[in-house]
Amino acid sequence: MGSFSIWHWAIVAIVVLLLFGGRGKLSAMMGDAAKGVKAFRDGLKDTDETKSSDEQRAGALPRTEAEKEDLKR
């Protein structure tokens, strides 16, 4: 009951070969996961910046046409 048969070792060998075999598949998968996490964080930063600028605009007084022209220059 405590020993493994040849089929158990074959399955373990196949899993190890799939994970670690052939041009660093595991490192490539981890690199893709890291890119996904980075893209997610960048997406969160964009929404936070947009939200904070909306809050700043909500507290500002309305501008006159002359002030708007000065800002455009």
Image (spheres, rainbow, N blue to C red):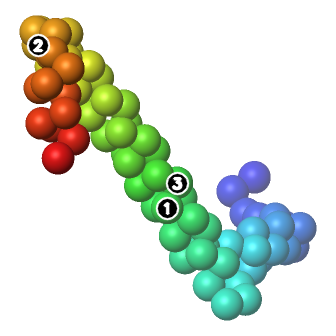
Residue pictured at 36% horizontal, 31% vertical? 47
Which element type, helix, strand or loop, lies under badge 3? helix
* Residue 37 visible somewhere in the drawing: no
Could you tell me residue 63's position as x and y percent? 15, 16
Q: Amino acid at mark 3?
A: Gly
Residue 27, picture quadrant: bottom right
- Tell which circle, 2 or 1, labels the residue nearer the N-terminal end: 1
Do the residues under discs 2 and 1 have CB atoms within 8 angstroms? no
Q: Amino acid at mark 2?
A: Ala
Q: Which mark is residue 36?
A: 3
Residue pictured at 13% horizontal, 24% vertical? 66
Which element type, helix, strand or loop, lies under badge 1? helix
How packed is label 3: few (under 14 Cα within 10 Å), some, or many (20 or more)? few
Q: Amino acid at mark 1?
A: Lys
Q: Which residue is mark 2?
A: 60
Do the residues under discs 2 and 3 have CB atoms within 8 angstroms? no
Residue pictured at 66% horizontal, 78% vertical? 25
Q: Which residue is mark 1?
A: 35
Do the residues under discs 3 and 1 have CB atoms within 8 angstroms? yes
User: Label 3 to label 1, Cα distance in Å?
Assistant: 4 Å
User: Label 2 to label 3, Cα distance in Å?
Assistant: 37 Å
Left or right of 11 on screen, residue 47:
left
Could you tell me residue 46's position as x and y percent? 36, 39
